């Protein structure tokens, strides 16, 4: 936890917060509490700053919170990702969010097993927990918008072209593409990441028709979460 | 498994291999065996190509192996990484190896807990298993060289300057560095990655004295394995 993420409802007076939940336990047991000690803190959807210990006991801590600057900027990338297998889903989500993605679409694809859509990791509470952990990791306060599309074709034909039209560039990872991943810092981009084993030919052709350009990271096949980290790092 | 990784000892005749171990089970149960089906294959330390099913039953498979091209080139980066906590160690190792790192040093640092050095994940058999999984993932056959240094100061003062002198550039990730990570494809580089919480001031100064330049990925704090993926992607 690199940022103590607070809700508006945690405040019992202006600038004063009392915590006794998971966050208190982490402050007490991992970060260690001490009189006057201060931590980075932020309020969901708002500014970041510091939280200073006023008093604490075995079950709760009172903190004085001063929020005075903006959270880090987003990375400008709208991520569209074939729904990964459950054990990979939270790694992909964590990677995307900590690297500054604020708009994500998880979509179906031929090589996505139907059962992945029923996975417990997709339950709103589970996703919310992952979002908070990611924001706490990277020092951010701004929630992402996460969308799910269970049908590839209508998404690729109807929604994707509009997302592409609103961006300065749109790319999908393809191991045999001719073009390398470009460096486009500060641009609004669309990035499409395929399933393990890649999109099939039909899906590739729909992506290209929607204006998404195939790019390659090289001939090495990476796990989805590392391919995503590498693509985001190169693009932005 | 994107590459069936073979040993010289798997061959019972020129170009012919019989398998009944973990690799056979993965071919049988995950990839699915069929007459004449072929897979990407390579031999440890050697070339890559294809392995075609000759015959199989419930307990073994015979494959005809044709190796005709070189594995992917390495990425030119010598990675020096503060020993991560055990559950992160295999992610860092996997990320580094699949992205083409062939020389790794895991080193001590003030914020590395002493107990990490006794972790079972560092046992040679456990490391060998991770190496094979990584090579199978990324389609490579070349084993890395992995070194461990349990004392930071002698490493930073005596060995590191020589590694830096043999490279075209040397960098370490530092959240408050002024310089961004440069793009230096095709160069021989040294990359130093700190522990969670970063190197301390003394360590930073020894790194700089050894000729390693601080660079930043931005103000977001990433998990070690994603910071590593991002740094490797940007550098090469």
Image: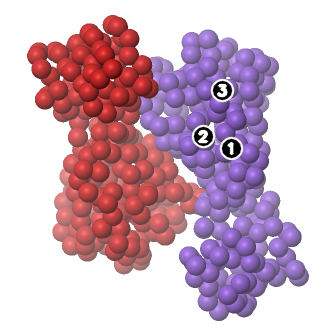
Chain colours: A red, B purple
Would residue B216 be seen by someone viewing this image from the given angle? yes
> Are the two marked residues, 2 and 1, in contact with CB atoms closer than 8 angstroms?
yes
Q: Position of residue B143 (x, y in %)?
A: 76, 53
Q: Position of residue B223 (x, y in %)?
A: 47, 37
Q: B187 or A6: nearer the eye?
A: A6
Q: A131 or A186: nearer the eye?
A: A131
For the point 35% across and 39% down, the residue is: A134
Instruction: Say above or below: A75 vs A10.
Output: below
Instruction: Say above or below: B167 vs A37.
Output: below
Q: CA distance from mark 2 to mark 1?
A: 8 Å
In the rendered structure, which disc, 3 or 2, sits on the residue that comes first in sequence?
2
Asked whether, in this view, residue A173 is left or right of residue B122, the answer is: left
Q: Position of residue A168 (x, y in %)?
A: 28, 49
The kind of secondary structure element at disc 3 is helix
The residue tagged 2 is: B86
The residue tagged 3 is: B114
In the rendered structure, which disc, 1 or 3, sits on the residue that comes first in sequence?
3
Dot 2, crowdedness within 10 Å: few (<14), some or many (≥20)? some
């Amino acid at each position: 936890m690199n940022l103590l993420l607070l809700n508006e409802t945690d405040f019992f007076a202006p600038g004063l917060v009392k915590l006794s939940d998971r966050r208190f336990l982490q402050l007490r047991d991992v970060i260690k509490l001490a009189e006057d000690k201060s931590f980075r803190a932020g309020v969901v959807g708002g500014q970041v700053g510091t939280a200073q210990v006023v008093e604490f006991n075995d079950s709760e801590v009172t903190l004085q919170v001063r929020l005075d600057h903006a959270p880090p900027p987003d990375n400008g990338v709208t991520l569209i990702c074939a729904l990964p297998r459950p054990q990979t889903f939270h790694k992909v989500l964590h990677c995307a969010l900590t690297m500054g993605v604020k708009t994500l679409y998880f979509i179906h694809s031929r090589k996505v097993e139907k059962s992945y859509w029923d996975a417990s990791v997709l339950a709103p509470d589970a996703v919310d927990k992952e979002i908070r952990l990611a924001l706490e990791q990277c020092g951010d306060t701004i929630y992402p918008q996460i969308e799910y599309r269970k049908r590839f074709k209508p998404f690729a034909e109807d929604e994707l072209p509009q997302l592409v039209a609103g961006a300065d560039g749109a790319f999908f990872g393809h191991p045999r593409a001719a073009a390398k991943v470009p460096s486009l810092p500060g641009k609004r981009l669309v990035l499409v990441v395929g399933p393990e084993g890649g999109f099939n030919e039909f899906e590739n052709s729909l992506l290209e028709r929607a204006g998404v350009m195939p790019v390659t990271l090289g001939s090495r096949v990476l796990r989805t979460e590392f391919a995503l980290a590498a693509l985001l790092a190169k693009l932005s």
